Each structure stands twice: as structure tokens, then as C-alpha cells.
Amino acid sequence: MSLATTYSPTDVEAKWYQRWQEQGFFKAKPNPKKKPYTVVIPPPNVTGVLHMGHMLNNTIQDVLVRRARMQGKEACWVPGTDHASIATEAKVVAQLKEQGINKTDLTREQFLAHAFEWKDKYGGIILEQLKQLGASCDWDRTRFTMEPDLTDAVLRVFVDLYNKGLIYRGVRMVNWDPEGRTAISDEEVIAKDVQAKMYYLKYAVVGQEGQFLTVATSRPETIMADVAVAVNPNDPRYAHLAAAQVRIPLLGREIPVIFDEYVSTDFGTGALKVTPAHDLNDYELGVKHNLPVIDILADNGTLNEKAMLYVGQDRFAVRKQIAKDLQEAGLLDKIEEYASIVQTSERTKAVIEPKLSLQWFMKMEQMAKPALDVVENDTVKLHPPKFKNMYRAWMENVRDWCISRQLWWGQQIPAYYLPDGSFVVALTAEDALQQAIAQTGKADLQLSDLRQDEDVLDTWFSSWLWPISVFDGFKDPDNADINYFYPTNDLVTGPDILFFWVARMIMAGLEYRQEVPFKNVYLTGIVRDAQGRKMSKQLGNSPDPLDLIAQYGADGVRTGMLFSAPAGNDLLYDVKLVEQGRNFSNKLWNAFRLVKGWEADASLPFVNEKAVTWFNAKLQAAIVEMDDHFEKFRMSDALMTIYKLVWDDFCAQYLEMVKPAYQHPIDTETLRHTTAYLETLLKLLHPFMPFITEELWHELAERGPRDYVTVAPWPRAIAPANSAETLASMDKALAIVAGIRAVRNQKNLGPNKPLTLVAKTDEPQLVTDYEGIIRKLGSISEVSFADAGPAASVSFVLGGSEFFIPLEGHIDMAAERARLEKELEYAQGFRDSVLKKLGNEKFAQNAKPEVLEKERQKLADAEAKIAALEQALKSL
């Protein structure tokens, strides 16, 4: 056998992934003889490319799926992509601009043709990248949220919920993206810290010449939409303004002063301008006080004719200009800078405008309660459970869901408007026509008389159906796939979409299958850099995952991501983690090369029984521990268990115990056990490191055509007899070896220098039983027993035993004595200086308690060092 000294991932990854697919190992179908294990991928946007968050999320999913497959379950991991209305439309619009085409110059059908062309060209990139990571999805089941069957499911649900009275159309406050010119959901809004300005404006009090009410605002461009100024009724500064009116600066329109305890007396001036059309809290205040609503902003963020001033100008240009104009008019008291937060669109980066808008909404309260109950009673378990509080807070304060978007890319809302302005909701235009005729009594109505709503549905309105729709549960509610694979088992996602996606999927599952869609939700943290910043292209702190795979191998990257990724906690990424993953691959590779290079001799006796028995006990204990970690979704802990077992116990200890002398054969029994252990380790490692384990699996032995580690049975723990005693005894033996190695390091005695060991112990049988291991790992030529230590030796104590290593002939005794005496003299001097400091009455009285304690600890350490040095000198 001639294997390279270093593992080369690029030589094996593409090969094994292709073979797994050729063998159909990732394909799943209903099988009554097996338990199903189902995972649906959180569908990445078709605009997306693999980033560090995807790497973490999909590695965890793959680990779970691969292990389930090895456990004999029918493992089905459904991949797919989300049409991502806003992001994709923005990409297509930008591409069209480069070609000199404006969206407004196209019909809806023409635009959609361009969009689908873009999707077909770029939309599958991320799925191909997931294959490089090793994701074992059933690619034949790949779905897309805007494919015909899934679109049909979305429209059916819309019609059904409308008929149930849960969907309505109305004017409500929404997040408005002036650049995308659409309403967006809360999860598409990103809060950004900024240094903002607070403008203090002077509102003249009507009828009180020269009197002004000063109002602080960060948005002076909205004053033309003011309908009142609110103050707290308990604020004595404004008690005299009851029933008063003030004039809006520059505009001159008179508006009332109202009193409401909502207003904070200690923010700004304690006076709040009320602009119901452009602030949610102001809107609610306006409803309470029956105030009018004046919307001065056009959809593109410019001021409309209702503003009367600055009409047609951009909102931020107006902010600059109105500050100048107010200053010139003597109506600007001052400007202050302060730290603030602005809400921005995740997709276009535009500053969001709260805006009253005619939209479609879904009532959430009725569906939220059962979806909260199933999490509270652990029908759906959140991992870690700390996220229950966040989930509860959202669900108990749920708001109606704005489900319409002013876009073309997406599922067009199945509402049809009649010439009289009324509308009907129907699955098809033909159905809508029949409804319209029945509703109006006009039998001569034609399809051309109906106009379908221009808006599309929020992307989440398709992805909330994902666990059902990917198995065609709406198209065919009783089909074999949905009956077998639903409910799914585990969902892996981020806590940032716990409400926006996870909760809504639970609602949909309960509504349409009367069952929760999954049993466990594993919530990953955010991948951050070493400074704690979220990784992003904008910051330039995120490495390209494909570059990492090319440099360190997929297995190295997967393990590197999982080394410090406990559920629910952020991962502080450091390239050293990925280097550690690559080094682990090399460690495993070289352990295999060592074992594979041994020649067996059947005539040799089985001299490694102690080592073989010990490692079997360690292996079985590790299997139990790993299974427990998996049950509790402690993925990083499960990885660390097998990592330590391989690196520390198998490579650093076991192989050193059993390996034969250079160019000497090994007995067949030891080789048989060692090979079996290595095979089991490959199985345990496979979910984390699929590529190298498959490569070594096939190198380790001749395999049948479908004998792959990816479908090998997951190891079951078999507790060996007396395992606790075996482990305890070996721990003592290895502690003796560690003591010998410490002496070697301390005295600079290399491992090639044979030493002797003298034991003064009440456990002579243990030393005798493990003498072979102690001698081999400690490079000891002879072990003997005595009641006292020999002269000129150094010792170490373990429990009630003391072990001596004679130094005569190994070191220059005179030089060693001189060294120890010099070190003793220094330690005594240091001790005396600490004693002097502690004896200083002024220091003792004035020093802080922690400083005194630190000095006392220094004294204790010095005295311990002196005692050790004196003992070492006595032994010379």
C-alpha cells in the first residue's frame, strides 16, 4: 500500500459524492419496514450563494440526516429554493437596466419571462454549492416555491383562508420600502445604529402673541402631515395649553394641542408632534383621539401634493432644505446630534417609511393560540428551550400579517375586481367570473370585465406551507409521501425567523394537517468574526465558503464550524477552527496509514489484551455519550466526544500501546481488534466527516458494490464487563506514564534514553499488570519495587504511591545540584521579600483585601516550591 503522507481532499470529495448519487443512497421513498426520518431544508433564496450561515445550518442538517440513514431509518432530506420576491425582482430589474430596459416598459408577462430566465440561469447555484459541502439531500425531490404545484397550493390556501374570514383587505400601517416600492415584512427590516439629528421646532401658539411650543423631532420633513401636538396631562409646563391651537411652522395650518399620558415628559421637550400617516404609535394615538390622517409621501419617497410644500422632492433632500428654511424663519430653536436607530430594507438598504397603505392582511390571533400551545407543552421542542420565552412573547402579542407585496415576481393574489370596484376571490379567473355573475346578477359579465389584483403574496406565504407542499399535501392530501414523511422530524434554522417562519409553519400544519409539521426545532446561532461582528459582505469579514473548502477540505470546514457551535449560541469563527478540522483529517489519515502498514504474524502471542480491553471500554462509553448528545441536540458535544476519542485515546494512547517495533510484525489478534476499532470510528465520524471516512472505509478492506460507510449501521453500545474497573486501572497506569514523561521534560531526558522505574506502592499488582504499557509508553527498561527510593533519584507521587527514577548516569549530578541550589536560593529570597511586604504594618492596613490575598498566595506558592527543591536536593 502506498498512500500519500498528507490527506488530499480534492482527490476524493467529487469522486465519493458522485458515487453516492449513482448508488441512490440519498433517495427516499415510503417504506413500511423502516421508520421515516424527514428534514426539509430552509429554502435558500434563488438569488443566494453559499455563505457561512448556510455552511453551519446545512452541516448540522447533514449530520442529523446521515446518522439517521445509518440508524436504518428512511432518511429523506428535501432540498429546494425560495423565489424571494423582493431580492429576485431587484436582481432582474438591475439586469434589465444593464440591457437598457426599464421594468415599466414591459408587460407583466414579459417581465416574468425575463425573471424565469434569470432564475433558470442562476437560481440553482447554491444547491450545487451544497453538494460540495457534502449535503446528502434527495435531489430528485428538489422543489421551488414558485413552481406550478406549489403556486397552486399557495392560491388554494389564500382562497380557503379568505372564505374562512381570516384574510381581509384594508388600510393599515406597514413597513414601506420607497426604493422597492413595496410593503415589506418585519423580518425584512434591519435596524442600523446611526448618528442622527434632533431638530427643535417652534410651533406658534394661536392667540398668544410671541408664545411658542417647542417640539423635538428627528423628521422635520413630515411636519406638513402633523395633525396635533401631544403633551402629558401631568406635565405642569403645558397645563396652560388646554384647548389651545398651534401653527405648523412654515405651513401655518392650525392644529390642536392634545393631552395623553402616552407622551414621555423626559424625552425631548415633552411635546410630541402627531403624524398618524407616518408613525405607528402616532397612528394609534390618532385613532384614540379621532384625528385626521394626512399622507404626504409618495410611494417613491418624494413629497406629494398633500404636503403643499416641497412637492416632488425627495424626503431626505427636503430634510436638509426645511432645516435651512426654518432657521431663516426663526422657527428652528436648535439642532442636537444623538445616537439613534433607523430601520432599513434588508434588500434595497433604503430607509423604511411607516406608511398607511391599502393591503391584504391575514388575521393571526385565532391561529396563534394552538401554535403557542404545542410549543408550551413540548409537542414541538425548541433546542435550546430558552427560546420558548421569545416564542411566547411574539405569539401572545401577535399582529395581523401583511401578506401583499407590490411586485410582479411571486404568486399573484387571486382577487378579481369588478367594474363597480367590488371584488371576488377565486382560484381561477373562470371561477371568479362565475362568482362575479352570481354576486352582481349580471349574466353578461365577461372575463375582460375582471381585473386581477396586481400585487403578489409575501414570500413567507409560500414558505409557511413548505413541509406540506413539498410532499404535494395540498394537491393530493392523502398521497403516500405526505402520509409517510409528514410530520417531519427535525428543523434546523435561525432564531431570527422563529416567528416569521417557524411559528407560521406550525400554524399551517395544525390548520391543514391537524398535526405539527416537525417535532424538534434546532436553533443555530449567528456566525460572527473574532470581534463578535456578524459576518457580511459589506464588512468584508466573511470568507468565501468555497475557498475554505478548496483550501481545507469539506470535512475540515464542517468540523471546524461545529467545534464551537452550541445550539442557540453564536459561533465566533476563527480560521484556526477550520485548520483544526483539517489537522484532524490528517491525524485520522495517518492513523490509518500506520495500521494499514502493519504486517501480521500468526505465530506471535496476543500481548496487547490490556490495551485492547481498555480501548473497547472507552469506545463503548463514547458511543453511549454520543447518542445522549444527539438525543439532546448537543451537536458540538457529540463531535468533541468522537474527536477526543480518536485524537487522544486512539491515536495518542492506544496505537502507541499496541504498535510493534519498527519493521517488526504485529500479532493477528491485535491487528484484528485494531482494524475493527478503526472501522467503528469511521462510522461514528461519518456524519461529521463524510468524505474522508468513505475513502478510508474502502481502503481499509475489500468492499461489496453497495458496502459504503454512508449506509453502514450506526454502532450500538455494548457495555463490556468490568468496564469501570478497566478504565480506572488504565487511568492509573497512564498517570504513571505521564509522571515519567514529566520527569523527562523537567530533566531534559529524551524518549530515546532508557530509564528505570522504582515503585513504592500498595498496588504492586496494577503496576505488574500494566508493566508492558508503562515500559513502552514511558521508554522504561526496567520496573522494580522497593520500600524506599534509591539515592540520586527524582520522584513523583500518585495517590498513596511514590515512583522514583534514578538519575545516576543520565545527568551531570554536580551540575544538577548546583542548578537546584541556585533555584532554591532564588525561591527563598522571593519568599523573604513577600514576608517583608506582609509584615509591613502600613501595607497590611491600607491594601485592598484582594491584594493581600494575592500576596498570601505568592507566599504559599514560594514555600511549596522551596519544599519541593529541598526534597529534590536530598534525593541527589
Image (spheres, helix red, strand yellow):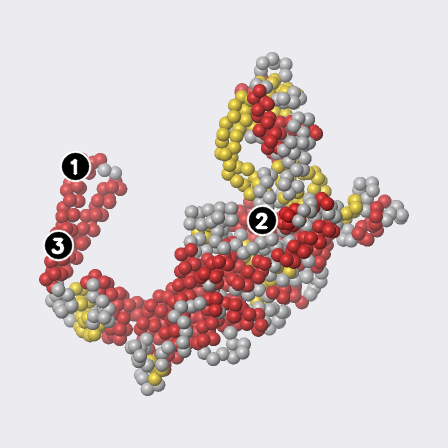
Q: In x, y percent, where is residue 257? A: 62, 22
Q: Which residue is nearer to you in this view: 397 or 490?
A: 490
Q: Is 664 rendered above or below residue 95?
A: below
Q: Relative to residue 225, is residue 242 depicted above or below?
A: above
Residue 365 vs 336, above or below: the answer is below
Give the spatial CA distance, label 2 vs label 1: 64 Å
Name the kind of residue labelled 1 in the image: Glu
Q: Position of residue 843 (x, y in %)?
A: 19, 37
How many numbered callouts?
3
Which mark is first along the chain, 1 or 2? 2
**Residue displayed at 52% across by 70% down:** 15
Q: In x, y percent, where is residue 721?
A: 37, 74
For label 1, the crowd category at 10 Å Cα-Cα, with few meaning under 14, some 14 to 19 and many 20 or more, is: few
Is 401 or 778 nearer to us in this picture?
778
Residue extending farthest to the bottom is 603
What element does badge 1 sit on? helix
Q: Earlier in the sequence, mark 3 or mark 2?
A: 2
Residue at 60%, 73% in the rendered image? 33
To which residue does mark 3 refer?
822
Which quadrant would the N terminus be assigned to in this image? Answer: bottom left
Tell whether 42 sits left or right of 849: right
| Residue assigned mark 2 | 499
The residue drawn where x is 18% and y is 54% is 865
Look at label 3 and name its amino acid.
Answer: Lys
Q: Amino acid at mark 2?
A: Phe
Any mark on residue 268, and which?
none
User: Which residue occupies 54% across, 78% down?
Assistant: 705
Q: Is residue 633 visible?
A: no
The relative height of residue 461 versus residue 648 in the rendered view (above or below) is above
Can residue 551 be seen at all in this image of the molecule?
yes
- In the picture of the structure, the residue carrying the numbered disc 1 is 841
